[in-house]
Image: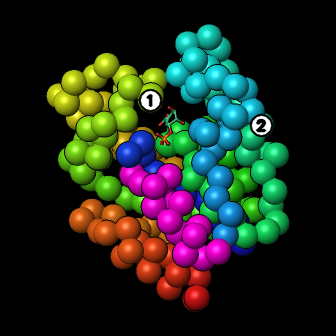
Amino acid sequence: MVLFLVGFMGSGKSSVGRRLAAALGYNFVDTDRAIEEDTGVTVSEIFAYEGEAGFRQRERELLRLLPSEGDVVVATGGGMPCYADNLALMRERGRVIYFKLSPDRLLARLGRGRARRPKIAGMNDEELLEYITTTLPAREAWYSQADMVIDCNGATDDYIIYHVKNFLNC
Ligand code: S3P
């Protein structure tokens, strides 16, 4: 079973995803890190030299190369399901799980880690909250098509893992 974790930057796809994979005995892939390993440069460098379009192309190619068999948790980049036919492909190949968080919680969680995210690098709290509140509604149109939506507001990692396991009946 392939589990695709989707959600906004800072929603815990990578951190909870890694723990979820360990709890289920699944492999773990983080799409941003996989692109960085493949190219030998950072996501920020790809944005700088190839633009966002170049990065989206790389994301799309990576998704197509991921194995569709075997047990794996895939933590996707926050924009991945919102471009091209990526979401349809994820739904075809596995189960899609949305980690849903309010703008305030996302802001708090993105306290650190802004620098390595080119879309929000250098923003102060006010600018970031504005960015989240204006971007999230459009992205939710994609995220909410997930097979499972987990309200992660105030949830511990263990609670989220418990819910995914329930969803999978294991
Ligand atoms: C992006 C999210 C990032 C990364 C890139 C663009 C986005 O992934 O793919 O910086 O457009 O939301 P995370 O959601 O893992 O931060």
Residue at 52 percent of width and 60 percent of height: 17
Secondary structure mostly seen in the magenta stretch: helix
Query: Which span is picked out in magenta?
Result: 11-25
Q: Is residue 57 above or below residue 47?
A: below
Q: Is residue 133 left or right of residue 97?
A: left
Magenta stretch: includes residue 112:
no
Q: Residue at 79% of width from left, 68% of height from top?
A: 70
Any part of residue 93 in sight: yes
Which of the pair 21/136 is nearer the observer? 21
- Check the image and tell me how it is coloured: rainbow
Residue where numbered disc 1 is placed: 117
Q: Horizontally, is 113 left or right of 126 in the view? A: right
Q: Is mark 1 within 8 Å of ligand 1?
A: yes
Q: Regarding mark 1 in the picture, which secondary structure is present there?
A: loop
Please determine whether, in this image, residue 89 is positioned above or below residue 94. above
Q: Which residue is mark 2?
A: 61
- Name the spot of residue 157 as percent of width and height, x first: 38, 68
Q: Where residue 130 is drawn, which disc sits there?
A: none
Q: Is residue 151 visible?
A: no
The residue located at (36%, 76%) in the rendering is 159
Residue drawn 60% across the image and 48% down it: 30
Indicate the quadrant containing the C terminus: top left, top right, bottom left or bottom right.
bottom right
Left or right, 115 with respect to 66, comes to left
Q: Residues within 10 Å of mark 2 (few under 14, many from 20)?
A: few
Which amino acid is tagged 2? Answer: Glu
Quarter of the picture containing the N terminus is bottom right
- Asked whether mark 2 lies closer than 8 Å to ligand 1, one says no
Q: Position of residue 41 (x, y in %)?
A: 64, 23
- Snapshot quadrant of residue 60: top right
The quarter of the displayed image where residue 57 is located: top right
